[in-house]
Amino acid sequence: MSLMFAQVCRLISQAILNRTVRKALDVDPASARLLIEKIEPRARSNAGLIGWVMVVAGIAIGALGIIEKAEDYSDSMPIAAVSVITGMGILLYTWWVGRSVPDVEQIEAR
């Protein structure tokens, strides 16, 4: 829940920032350029870490379900599968976004 809340807050802040830049472009394009230059590139998120945690948690839940062979075995496998699939999706998304966004360190070195 806290991750979703953080992402919603980030989405709102980006919307406000984009609206401010668009208004500045309409009013005075020269000042908008200064505003755009002052915007710091965003740092890498910790989405990759979250993805890895979900994959490892899914594998652990699946392994415990197999080892225990309890009557809850049928309940633990779907949970493990959803966790692994979601984690892999997050990792794939992080990789895809990381291909097109330069690192903050690379921008600062320029």
Image: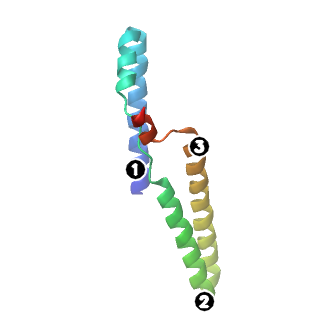
Observer able to see residue 63: yes
What's the distance in space between the residues labelled 2 and 1, CA to CA? 36 Å
Up/down of 110 relative to 24, above or below:
below
Labels 3, 2: front one? 3
Up/down of 6 relative to 84, above or below:
above
Observer able to see residue 70: no
Q: Is residue 70 left or right of residue 21?
A: right
Is disc 2 placed on a helix, strand or loop?
helix
> Of 80 and 71, which appears nearest the observer?
80
Q: Which callout, 3 or 1, points at the residue further toward the start of the chain?
A: 1
Q: Which callout, 2 or 1, points at the residue further toward the start of the chain?
A: 1
Total labels drawn: 3
Labels 2, 1: front one? 2
Residue positioned 44% across, 54% down in the render: 46
Instruction: Tell me the kind of residue under disc 3.
Output: Arg
> Of 10 and 44, which appears nearest the observer?
44
Up/down of 25 relative to 53, above or below:
above
Residue 77 disc label = none
Q: Quadrant of residue 17?
A: top left
In the rendered structure, are the residues bearing label 2 and label 1 in contact, judged by CB atoms less than 8 Å apart?
no
Image coordinates for residue 42, horizontal then vertical, percent: 41, 39
In the rendered structure, are the residues bearing label 3 and label 1 in contact, judged by CB atoms less than 8 Å apart?
no
Q: Which residue is mark 1?
A: 5
Disc 1 packing (10 Å; few <14; some 14–19; many ≥20): few
